[in-house]
Image (cartoon, rainbow, N blue to C red):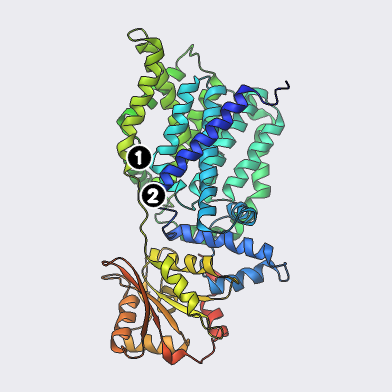
Amino acid sequence: MIKLFSNATYNTVAIFFCCALLTIVTQIHSGCFVAEFGDDEASHYISGLVIHDYLRSGLHVGPISYLKWFHSHYPLVGIGHWGPAFYGVEALWMTIFSPSRVSVLLLSTVLTAATATLIYYYGTTQLKLGRLASFFAAIAFVICRITQEGSSAVMLDIPITLCAFLALIVYVRYLDTERWIYSVLFGVIAAMAMLIKGNGALLALLPPFVIVLSRRWALMGRFSFWAPALVVALLAAPWYILTYGQIAAGFRYSWGAEYSRVAIVENSKILLSALGPVVVLLTGIGLVSGGRRGSIFPPSGFNGVVALLAAVWVFQSTAPAAIQDRYLAPLLPPLFLLAALGGQVVAGTLERRVVARVAGPLVFALILMTMLPSALNAEVKPQLGFRELAKTVWANRISENPVVLIAARGRAEVAAIAELAMMDPARPSLFAVRGSRLLGGGGYNRQDYLPKFADADQVAAEIDRYHIPLVLYQVDPGGWMHVAQVEAVRSHATDSWKLLGTAGTAESPVDLYKLPQAIGQEADVKLLLELASPKALQ
C-alpha cells in the first residue's frame, strides 16, 4: 500500500483541526455568531464586502468610481486607513463561501488555527521541543484572552500575527541556508503584513535583532541580507506614501519618550493580566535556558523567537498608534514557545522526582489551568438589536427614497451600517446615513466631536432637507449631542413619527421610526453623495 503522507503531515493536519475546533468553542463562548460587528470590525467587514461586490458586478465601472458609489451608501470603507491585502483575501473568501457573518468569522477561525499550527511546527522543527511542549504552545495561543478577542471578530491582528510568524519561519530558513530565495520571500511576507496594517512594519526590526543575537555580522555584507528592504520598498512603500496622512490620523498618541514610558508600563500590565504570572515566569526560564552556552536548543530557532519577541515589544513601545490588548497579539507565538521551552525544562527536572511519563503532561496541564481564569473572562460581545431591526428596515424600504438615518453612539452606529449592508439584496441599494456625519462632526477617532446644530429645531430641518423616511435610534445618555437632539425632535413630533419596531435591551433599546412627511418624496442623491464623500475614508 502506497503511503501518501508522512506521520508528521497527519500530525500537522490533526493539530490544525484540533485548534480550529477549540477556536470555534471560544467563538461560541464570545457570542460572536449572533452579535453585531463592532467599531473597526464593521469597517473591516464593509471593506472586504466592497471588493467582493465589485468583482461580482461585472467590472463595468472603474474600481475608484465603484468604491465611491458603495461608500456613499455604506460609509465605512476603511481602505486607505488600512491596507488592502486582507480585504482582498476576505473578498476571495466571501466569493468562495458567502459574505455572511458566520462565513467571515470562520475565516478568523482558519487564520487562528493556521497560526497555532505554525507554532506547533516551529516548536518541533526549529526549537526541537517535544510534541507535548509544542502542542501546549499552540493550545495556549488559541485560548489566550488576547487571541480570543481577535478570533471572535473580523479584525486585522490575527492576520498580522500569522504573517509575522510565517515571516519568522522563512527568515530562520534563510539563516540556516543563506539562500537568497528565502530572503526575498521574507520581504514579500513583510510587505504583505504592511499592506494589511501599519504595525506589519515591526518585521523591519527582525533581521537586525537576529544579527545581534546570533552575531552573524558577515551576513550584512551579502546582497541577500538587504533584498527584503528592496522588496518592501517596491511593494509596500508606494501605498504608504499615498496614505500616511490617513494612517497618522488614527494615532492616539504622539511620538516620543513619554509614549514609550507609558506603553512599556501598560503593555506589561496587559501581558501579566492575559497570561498570568506562571506563564511569564516560564518565559523567563525559557529565555535563560535557551540562551545559555551549550544549550541543546538550535541557536537559529531560539534566536529567531527572541528576535521576534523583541521586535514586537520595541515596535509597540515606540509607534504611538494606541495601547490595546490586541496590538500585542504578534507577541504571543514567540512568548508561548519560550514558555513551552521553560515548561519542558521544569518537566525534565521533575522527572527525577516523579514518574517520567507523568511529569510533562502534569506540568503543561497545570500551566494551562493557570491561564483559564483570564481565558474564561474573555469579552462576550453584546447583542445591540440591529440584526432584528435591519430586517424591518428592508421590509419598509421605499424604492424611490431608500434612506435611513442612524442616530446612535459609536459602536452602535457602525454596527447598524454593517447589518444593513449584509442584508442588502442588491448592494448597494440603501443609503445608510451616519448621524455623526449628518448632524455632528469630528476627526477619525471622533475625539474632537462637536454637534453641527445648536438645537432640535435645526436638526429637524436638516432631517427634512434630506427627505429622510426612516430613522434608527438608540438612546445615548450623556453621549453625542446630536442623538439627544434627535430624541427631542421625536418627542415633539409624536404624531408624525411612527414606531415600526423595537429591539435591544431594556437598558439600551433600539427603535425604528417611519417619518410620514418624507413619504412620496424622492431621495436627493446629489445631496447624499456630497454628505458621504470618501475624501476621508474610515
Q: How far across and how far down the image is residue 84, in percent?
A: 60, 56
Q: Nearer the viewer, residue 270 or 223?
A: 270
Q: Nearer the viewer, residue 1 or 489?
A: 1
Looking at the image, tell me whether mark 2 or mark 1 is earlier in sequence order.
2
**Quadrant housing the N terminus:** top right
Residue 374 position by quadrant: top left
Farthest top residue in view:
352
Residue 215 visible to the viewer: no
Residue 155 in the image, given as x and y percentages of width and height: 49, 52
Q: CA distance from mark 2 to mark 1?
A: 11 Å
**Looking at this view, is 448 or 149 the one in front?**
149
In the displayed structure image, the side of residue 169 where residue 502 appears, left or right? left
Which residue corresponds to the image point at 53% horizontal and 53% vertical from the top-left? 104
Q: Which mark is residue 30?
A: 2
Residue 508 picture quarter: bottom left
| Residue depicted at 27% across the width and 67% down the height | 506
Cβ atoms at labels 2 and 1 below 8 Å apart: no
Residue tagged 1: 375
Q: Amino acid at mark 2?
A: Ser
- In this view, the residue farthest toward the front is 1
Q: Amino acid at mark 1?
A: Ala
| Above-or-below relation of 194 to 413 | above
Disc 2 secondary structure class: helix
Residue mark closest to the camera, 2 vs 1: 2
